Image (tube, rainbow, N blue to C red):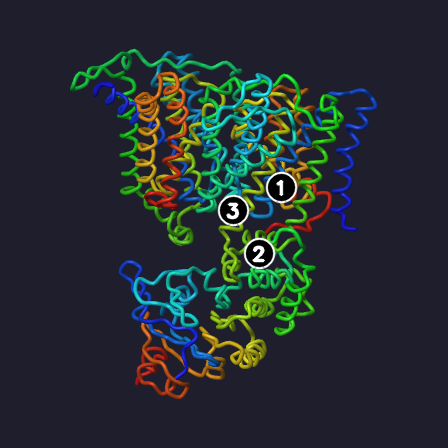
Amino acid sequence: MTEPVLATHGITKRFGAVTASEEVSLDLRPGEIHALIGPNGAGKSTLIKQICGNLRPDAGTVTFLSADVTAEDTVARARRGLGRTFQISALAMEDTVLQNAVLGAAGASRRAFSLWRPALTDRSLRAAAEEALERVGLSDYAATRTAELSHGQRRQLEVAVALTLKPRAFVMDEPMAGLGTEGSQTLTAFLDTLRHEAPILLVEHDMDAVFALADRISVLVYGRVIATGDREAIRTDPAVREAYLGEEA
Amino acid sequence: MTLLLFLEQVLNGLQFGVMLFLMAAGLTLVFGVMGLINLAHGSLYMIGAFAAAATAAATGSFLLGLAAALAAAAAAGAIVEVAVIRRLYPRDHLDQVLATFALILIFSEGTRWIFGSFPLFLDTPPWLSGPVTLPGGIQYPLYRLALIGVGLAVAAGLFLLIARTRLGIQIRAGESDREMIAALGIDISRLYTLVFALGAALAGLAGALVGAIQSVQVGMGEPVLILAFVVIVIGGIGSIKGALVGAILVGLTDTLGGVLLPLLFGVFLDPSAAMSIGSALASMSIYILMAAVLVVKPQGLFG
Amino acid sequence: MRRETLLNAAIALGLLAVPLWAWSAGEPFTITLATRAAILALAGVGLNLALGLGGLVSLGHAAFFGVGGYAMGILAHHAQTFAPLDLGLFTVAGTKSMPVIWLTAMVFSALAALAIGALSLRTSGVYFIMITLAFGQMFYYFAISWPAYGGEDGLSIWVRNGFPGLNTLDPIQFFAICYVLLMAALVLSAVIARSPFGLALNAARQVPQRVETVGIPVYRVRLVAFVISGTITGLAGALFADLNRFVSPSMFSWQLSGELIVFIILGGTARLFGPVAGACLFVALEHWLGGLSDYWHIYLGALLLGVVLFARGGLIGTLAGREVAHD
């Protein structure tokens, strides 16, 4: 078996009496899309925060590219090549689309402390940013203020900023949220090609997208992974049907 | 230094601390419930002191002066809340800082206009003057002892108010969940005015009480305001308990630092150098305390 | 050309034209007013880097202004008393040379900003405001209780410090020095705003979590900005002390910190020339209203309240339109 790119090993997180993550072990292998699904309040966001470095687990470890990154913060994990998109678009709304993408490129090339040369006319930063915008289909909007983008375009820009990092793995928190049918289909097609560049840990509510894309699916309920398997296995898993789909087994 | 002198300084620190608590409690309540940073809180302190001094001078009654201080500061607080502060709740902190800074300018210059630039004096009433002898033989001014008593009584009252009364329930609800209090059918804008006026009254009371041991003058509120901020940073924002602990820590550190540091440096320096270095460092001691808390617990001791 | 660019040019030329006119008309007091405006504007330009671009509402920038002022006061004091400054291990002679004084002022205000920033940037929001205010007050009380340099009374410097090749006693020449430094700081601000660093600082104000997820440490970005900001304000402090030939603890006062923010807001937040417009307006109001009434701060307060509540773009925003809307 190939070495996983990103993995959690028995991570546990408690908030007072509430156990948000309990002994969660997940892995993301090269070339795959691994979907993480679960009802609201299952602890998906808490898990993502531990994977991306916003929260420290109480127990267990996180490994990324064979390194133990449990003690590292968000910045260090991003520098290792962890590309993340947010559930609610986290973009500089006053800035233009291009500026948002250039920010990602500046971070990726460790140029954020360069004080002199203008960011937008720097050839390498601009090229990296424009390439990312092109790939998500936002080239025509480079000079638009981000606040003026539609909801769907903001979702695309989220992905573009992550792309500028040239990540070794993606963590995407509900990228389809709020997209119409057409938007979801476009993004689904895009993610389908993206998995060959870097594997994607996909948290998603849109079941059509999940079942269209995922190589494997993990189901999180009350902070625990109750099942991991391919689409068929999950579709037919009695525990999943009962706990998640709310059906009698 | 003798033990008696030390105990006297501890009492001084305690007295300073409980007065700071009266200031910090209002600030932290207003922040906790409404999310507002109010630089003009020091002006309400000043208004309390001036109202007390003017009323006491006119009537000869210290208690009437105190009542006037409470009434004037609460009224000023309520008026300002309705006229200006209310518009600032949805704004960012920068706007709140600027608007309340503008209020300081207006209040300070307005007071100077009415009362002039010379300080007023508020005398301690005869029945609270003179020293008392405490167990252990400490001679301590009765008035300062009364300040400690009043401060602690107000603190206890405030804890009871928040823990036991309807208003307290609403305040706690407002701190944890603003939408909930609307859902409970509470008139939010009335609650906010009430909380703001309550904080103002506490500041006014502190101003009047301290006014009798210091001079009453324009600009007296802001140094106390800044110390109250230090108290809040140390105690943790929005926490009444944090405000009490922080205030007493700051009061003791400031008072004892001023006495002990010069003595400490006197051990290995000549007296005049020890005095100057010691007092210069003592002036920084509470800020060093604040820095230490920031390093260990950036959200404050009870934040 | 954008209206704001034209307006900026008009402000820059206006600040140059007024003292030139006063010079030809023989009105040195007006030159001094313009110099005061230029220096306060420089202090505001420093603060604007942290506040406008970085969203760091520092209510303690008077600390850096004062450190700059005392750097000038202490060096010049030792030069005029011919007593070297005894630092224990070695002694340093005082100096009356502006470039040396400026460098010293900038180094020490940078160090002060590094220390204050490193502590206060561990927090954010209201905490940051309260902590910077408190640290500013710490410098104020320290200056009052430290007797070696005048304590509460401050230090007087008998003759203005010198600059090679210029006669700094001539008001218009001293104005020229301050004006050039102000323009240099504005150019520096404009360059920084466009650099990758400026982009990151500005984005960190809007969405810090995004900046971290592209591998940029927000704390360090803000700390660097805070240090540059404090350094510029410190330079302004040294010039201010030279203008008055006097330093006192009042340079550390919290009112001054508040007024620096007022410049930025009166002029227009997040505008390059905001602090310049604001400082000029402030000095003009101080002069005219101060002449009309002893209580001119009431009018200033009312004006400020009006701007905050009803005209959030400030002067430049009102005149140039809302291209840099702030929310």
Instruction: Report which residue position mark 2 lands on.
Output: A112
Where disc 1 sits, the SS reads helix
- Please, what is the three-letter code of the amino acid marked with disc 2? Ala
Label 2 chain ID: A
- Please, what is the three-letter code of the amino acid marked with disc 3? Leu
Residue A235 visible in rendering: yes
Instruction: Report which residue position mark 3 lands on.
Output: C223
Q: Is residue C316 above or below residue C289?
A: below
Q: Is residue C114 above or below residue C281?
A: below
Instruction: Report which residue position mark 1 lands on.
Output: C310
Q: Nearer the viewer, mark 2 or mark 1?
A: 2
Task: Judge if badges 3 and 2 mark residues of a common chain.
Answer: no
Q: Nearer the viewer, residue B201 or C43?
A: C43
State the image quarter where residue A221 is shown.
bottom left
Quadrant of the snapshot with the C terminus of chain A = bottom left
**Which residue appears at 61% of the width and 55% of the height?**
C196
Label 3 chain ID: C
Q: What's the distance in space between the residues labelled 2 and 1, CA to CA? A: 36 Å
- Please, what is the three-letter code of the amino acid marked with disc 1? Phe
**Which residue appears at 55% of the width and 51% of the height?**
C205
Q: Residue furthest left?
A: B136
**Which residue appears at 47% of the width and 70% of the height?**
A171
Nearest to N terminus: mark 3 or mark 1? 3
Q: Is residue C97 left or right of residue A83?
A: right
Q: What's the distance in space between the residues labelled 3 and 1, CA to CA? A: 33 Å
Q: Position of residue A40 (x, y in %)?
A: 39, 69
Q: Is residue C308 left or right of residue B290?
A: right
State the image quarter where residue B145 is shown.
top left
Task: Judge if badges 2 and 1 mark residues of a common chain.
Answer: no
Q: Is residue B8 left or right of residue C101?
A: left
**Which residue appears at 37% of the width and 30% of the height?**
B285
